[in-house]
Every structure is written in structure tokens, then in C-alpha cells.
Image (cartoon, helix red, strand yellow):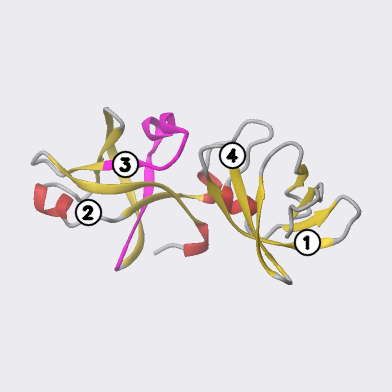
């Protein structure tokens, strides 16, 4: 078993593939190349989370086929349907400058440029136009677009995001 707070989701097991125990995984990570270098993954389901050795990886269209140690036939692979595939936080790939993992942003304090506490990030929504910070404020929930004119600075070491409080932004 592993620490649930350490789990970073990278894919969802959709179904078995073939008869030799491969599972078809829908990636949720933007870094799809990362699958080729996986040696171990975390498999999370109703019974908890466990670390499993990756025996083989190959691509099939937008999906990734994984052969996991101990999953040696179609029935064993079918039992993993709807399980989540993840990695430990220490094993995530570094992101380009100015990009952040959601787990890094959740819990950050959001402050206005003048230092006023606005609230705390509870989630990040990936929307077509731009990402949106879901911020818990003293007045409820605020949705803040992650755009250059709103987000001025992200300081992960201080767990703080500085925003420009544009008129009408916070209701």
C-alpha cells in the first residue's frame, strides 16, 4: 500500500487488451511520452493502492497498453477495469517554466497585488480557453481565470498565488 496523498493520476484503465494480460489505459497526463520510461506504477481501485512493476508499454492510437507484473491473462486484466494508474509525486516529470501541476496549486493562498488574502485554491479546472482556479473565499467560491492579466505570480515555495484584482473579478 502507498500514501494516498502521494498519488498522482496519469491514466484510467478502460478495458483488457488481448489475452496476455495487457490493459488499455486512457492517459490523463499531457506528457504522454512518460509512459515509455515507466518502470513502476501505482494502481488504485476499491481495494486500495499498490505499486506494480511495468513489464511492457506500447502505444495504440490515443491509448497506452500496459503489461503489469502479475496480470497474466484477460481475466486478471479485466479485473483492473476502472482502476486508476498513477505515479508517486517524487516521480512526476518536470514541467516547463510557468507550468504547474494541479496538486502543487491546490492549497495555495491567493492574494491580491496589495497583499489582501482572497482565499485558498481548492481545485483547478482545465477549460478550453484557459485553466480556472477554484478559490474558496470568505464569501463562497470564486472562479479565477489563469491568464496573464489576472495571475501575476506563482510562488510554490511560499504556497502563494498573487493576482490582479480586476474590477468585477471577485463578484
- CA distance separating discs 1 and 2: 41 Å
Horizontal arrangement in the rendering, residue 20 relative to residue 33 (left or right): left
- Which one is in front in this view, the residue at disc 4 or the one at disc 2? 4
Picture quarter containing residue 44?
bottom left
Q: Residue 23: x and y, percent?
A: 21, 43
**Residues at marks 1 and 2 touching, judged by CB atoms closer than 8 Å:** no
Name the residue beneath numbered marker 2. Answer: 81
Camera-side residue: 101 or 73? 101
- CA distance separating discs 4 and 1: 20 Å
- CA distance separating discs 4 and 2: 31 Å
**Residues at marks 4 and 2 touching, judged by CB atoms closer than 8 Å:** no
- CA distance separating discs 3 and 2: 11 Å
Query: Magenta stretch: residue 41 in it?
Result: yes
Name the residue beneath numbered marker 4. Answer: 130
**Residues at marks 4 and 1 touching, judged by CB atoms closer than 8 Å:** no
Q: Secondary structure at mark 4?
A: loop
Q: Residues within 10 Å of mark 1 (few under 14, many from 20)?
A: many
Name the residue beneath numbered marker 1. Answer: 118
Give residue 73's mark.
none
Please state the extent of the stretch shown in magenta in the rendering: 25-46
- Which one is in front in this view, the residue at disc 1 or the one at disc 2? 1
Q: Secondary structure at mark 1?
A: strand
Q: Residues within 10 Å of mark 3 (few under 14, many from 20)?
A: some
Q: Residue 61: x and y, percent?
A: 27, 27
Name the residue beneath numbered marker 3. Answer: 26
Seen in the picture, residue 146 relative to 80 is either above or below; the reply is above
Query: Magenta stretch: residue 15 in it?
Result: no
- CA distance separating discs 4 and 3: 22 Å
**Which callout, 4 or 1, points at the residue further toward the start of the chain?**
1
**Which callout, 4 or 3, points at the residue further toward the start of the chain?**
3
Q: Secondary structure at mark 2?
A: loop
Amino acid at each position: 500500500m502507498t500514501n494516498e496523498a502521494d498519488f498522482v493520476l496519469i491514466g484510467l484503465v478502460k478495458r483488457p487488451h488481448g489475452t496476455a494480460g495487457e490493459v488499455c489505459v486512457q492517459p490523463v497526463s499531457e506528457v504522454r511520452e512518460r509512459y515509455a520510461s515507466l518502470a513502476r506504477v501505482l494502481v488504485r481501485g476499491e481495494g486500495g493502492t499498490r505499486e506494480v512493476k511495468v513489464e511492457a508499454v506500447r502505444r495504440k492510437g490515443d491509448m497506452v497498453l500496459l503489461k503489469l507484473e502479475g496480470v497474466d491473462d484477460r481475466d486478471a486484466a479485466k479485473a483492473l477495469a476502472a482502476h486508476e494508474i498513477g505515479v508517486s509525486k517524487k516521480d512526476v516529470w518536470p514541467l516547463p517554466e510557468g507550468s504547474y501541476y494541479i496538486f502543487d496549486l491546490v492549497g495555495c493562498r491567493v492574494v491580491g497585488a496589495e497583499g489582501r488574502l482572497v482565499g485558498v485554491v481548492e481545485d483547478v479546472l482545465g477549460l478550453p480557453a484557459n485553466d480556472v482556479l477554484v478559490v474558496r473565499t470568505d464569501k463562497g467560491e470564486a472562479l479565477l481565470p489563469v491568464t496573464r492579466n489576472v495571475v501575476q505570480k506563482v510562488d510554490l515555495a511560499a504556497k502563494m498565488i498573487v493576482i490582479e484584482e480586476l474590477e468585477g473579478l471577485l463578484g
